[in-house]
Amino acid sequence: MRLRQLGRIGTAGALTVAAAGVSIVFTPSMASAESAWQCYGKQVKRCATVWWDRETDTYRARAKITDVAGGGNYTVKVNDVKLLRFNGTETLTVKSAKDDDGWHGTEDLAGTASVNPCRWPKNSFQVQARFSWKEKGGTASTKTWRPAMGWGHMCD
């Protein structure tokens, strides 16, 4: 099996592209496939990925939030992480993790349990998480986000 990362085309388009076999980005090596984070944010960086464990050939959702040096001084947390799959008609939650371990001074990382993606060989996968950050003495900002990226798996 191999990991394939589908371009920024949305969930429905990701499955169509995967079925057609066009515009699929194959990762150049296993190591880079494991760490293909999709991130956004300047003072607080929010990142998510569908993580491939090459040893067990499984997927899991991972998310992290980091207080970027040189910006504001934020405490951060990430929770409610979900591994989603699109079956051609609807997006379904495969695994989820609440991860309510509280606020962290610089960075927080959360993830779901692993699944065998070949259980659904013609599906694409996404990750979604809830990111929160606050300055000392301030009120929290929260955003639920998922990258506009789909991940697929070439099953034997």
Image: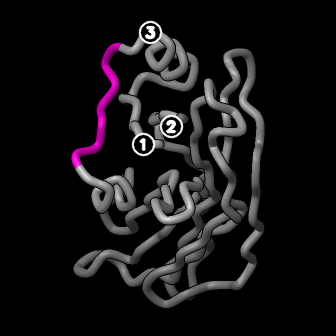
Q: CA distance from mark 2 to mark 3?
A: 14 Å
Disc 1 secondary structure class:
strand
The label shown at residue 2 is: 1
**Which circle marks residue 59 in the picture?**
none
Region rendered in magenta: 22-28
- Tell me: residue 22, above or below residue 63: above
Name the amino acid, label 3.
Ala
Residue at figure coordinates x 48%, y 34% from the top left: 154
Disc ID at residue 153: 2
Disc 1 + disc 3, Cβ < 8 Å: no
Instruction: Indicate which disc, 1 or 2, sits on the residue closer to the N terminus.
Output: 1
Q: Position of residue 152 (x, y in %)?
A: 50, 35
Residue 92 is situated, as x and y percent measured from the top left of the image, at 77, 35
N-term mark: 2 or 3: 3
**Horizontally, is 124 left or right of 31 in the view?**
right
Q: Are marks 1 and 2 in contact (CB under 8 Å)?
A: yes
Name the image quarter holding residue 56.
Answer: bottom right
N-terminal label among 1 and 3 = 1
* Above/below status of 22 relative to 58: above
Q: Nearer the viewer, residue 146 or 115?
A: 115
Query: Percent x, y for residue 23?
Result: 31, 19
Closer to the eye: label 1 or 3: 1
Task: Tell me the kind of residue under disc 1.
Answer: Arg
Check disc 2 and give the amino acid type: His
Q: Residues within 10 Å of mark 1 (few under 14, many from 20)?
A: some
Assign a secondary structure to mark 3.
helix
